[in-house]
Image (cartoon, helix red, strand yellow):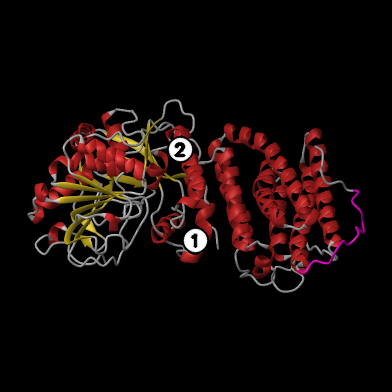
Amino acid sequence: METVIGLGCPSARECTAPLPAAPIWQDVLAQAVTGELVAAMNYSALAEVCEDPEEVSEALEHAEVERGHAAAFAAEGRAIGVEVADNTDAIHWKRLRESFMRCIAERDFIGCLIVQEIMLESFAVASYARVGKVAPGSMGGTFAAIAAEEGEHVDHAMDILRAERARDRQRFDEKMHRLHLDVMTTLARMLAKECRDGHCEVCHADCVKPALFDISLSAAELRGASLQQYLKTLDRLGLPGEVTLQWVAQLPV
Amino acid sequence: MGGAVAGVDFALIGHQESWRAAADVLAVLRGKERTPLPESEIRDILPWIPPRVVCHVEVRSIGGANAHGVYVDSFIPPGRLDAVWTHDNLARVRAAAECAIQAGAGIVSLGGFSSILIEGNFDQLPERRATVFTTGNTLTVAFIVQGVRKMCALEGRDLRRSTLLLVGATGDVGSGCARCLAQEVRRVLLYARNVERLRRLAAELEAESVEVEIATDLQQLHARADIVICAASLASPSLLLGRIAPDALICDAGYPKNLAPGADLPEATVFFGGLGQVAGGMAFSPDFRGVLNRHPFPDVAHGCLLEGMTLALEGRFEPFSRGRGFITPRRVDEIGAIAARHGIHLAPFHNAAGPIEELSACGARGAIQ
């Protein structure tokens, strides 16, 4: 797989012009960098449980790609004059990481793919695509390009997961539901219009969500787009639409 | 779009006509143990839901036959029915149609606004092999016409001496009602936005010796209607004020309803038209009874949806209602007879305030509550 964002992005990209909304973008980028680093950690862990050498190689490659994405987002922060922090131990991201690591502990390759490629990537693809439409300058292009690349990750996993579902539909759907309850509940809390679990530990000051309107975004839009992408991904897997609709309708808001 | 369901007889494509109705659907999906979502959340969430199968529907004929189908919601947001959203709404109906095809439906009914969007755009439906589509408008017309006749009889009105106003006259339902009732009334008033279509329909009726007046603005009409059929695609709460006889009989067959609750028509008799009742019963899984069909009587649904079920029970998988302007009295009688054979009849009368027939002694007069 080729990456559109190279790891060799400048470490101190020149700051072109200060943005009035820079503190908001700082937090948006911090969430993105953290998500990419969590994804990189997940793929690295996945490589350790893969049995097929080709799968090991692919997982390691994906981990590199995700680190490249994190670096690209961090560079976009520097370009607008802000230092983008990351915190993979932040409340929600830590929970998401723990969910993934439970699959690793069970050496559940399919479970790992479901968590990373179906759930977390749905969120990434949809939210990056929305952010890409409104982000200023090169940042918009970076978000859009990374959204497209994450979409390719989903496509790649889809073939494996469809084949797995074809082998035992009921078992697959039960696993999907179990992981949905675990992972998507955390994601739904993270995506809620208001953070009800206290500070997310990624935003540099107060919660960025109310300020998203200043950059033509909203927490509701990012949540809606993410859950829509998730439902469409489940549709592509062949899960019954009436069942997945119920799953999503039962998530916390 | 939803996953495959092995071969169903019919699919019903619909959407919710109000945020309250949408909230009730989501409340069922969330389950009784979870707090229903506030309307502000519903407004944020619903527009993002892709069209999909929401539940399974079983309908029983009095002749003993059963038909199994699915209800597909296009999730057109209730606040987005106007022209500016047409492109988006067409895409939603197309996606819902894909769901119906994927479900293996033999016949698909296009409910409510879906049928209005598609009646002139059948070519925009997705490619399909074994699935046929019907707007369901012919059975809707059948129930509207039956309703007007029955209500006139109940109220002792003489249809032959009446002036009939059709709101949304050039639509498929409006023009079908005009063709069916024109010969039974003294005069027909046609009201719609498109003057060319109005002229064509008027010429067609005049050729049958019907007295016709047309208008693109109700203020232009000289005659005063005492029977009104509202079959427009959008609600116009104050549309009729001062333009009809105070004690007029009004059949509101719009979806969403053309006359908003609170419309100030104190002397008029208002009833909801185009609805049928399934004597053999309908079952939903999950249980959406009274939620997807929000009527004060059991097993009531809109004629457009019932047409698909009727044809499935009859084993006639054909696009019975297709395109705009092809509904004739003969076709209306035909679908009415098929429906009756399976125990699908005109629903008991009601309006926003509740059932009417029980109150027929004092009429259904007064503002819609």
Q: Relative to A112, is A74 above or below? A: below
Q: Is residue A17 magenta?
A: yes
Name the residue: 32% across, 56% down.
Answer: B258
Percent coordinates x, y for residue B31 in the rendering: 44, 58
Q: Is residue A154 above or below residue A136?
A: above
Amino acid type for the residue under numbered disc 2 = Ala
Q: At which x and y percent is residue A252?
A: 55, 62
Placement of the C terminus of chain B among the 4 image quadrants: bottom left
Residue at 78% x, 34% y is: A52
Closer to the chain start, of discs 1 and 2, is: 1
Q: Which residues are magenta?
A: A8-20
Dot 1 amino acid type: Arg
Q: How many numbered callouts?
A: 2
Q: Which residue is mark 1?
A: B43
Label 2 crowd (10 A; few <14 / some 14-19 / many >=20): many
- Secondary-structure class at tag 1: helix
Residue that mark 2 sits on: B97
Disc 2, SS: helix
Q: Is residue B57 visible?
A: no
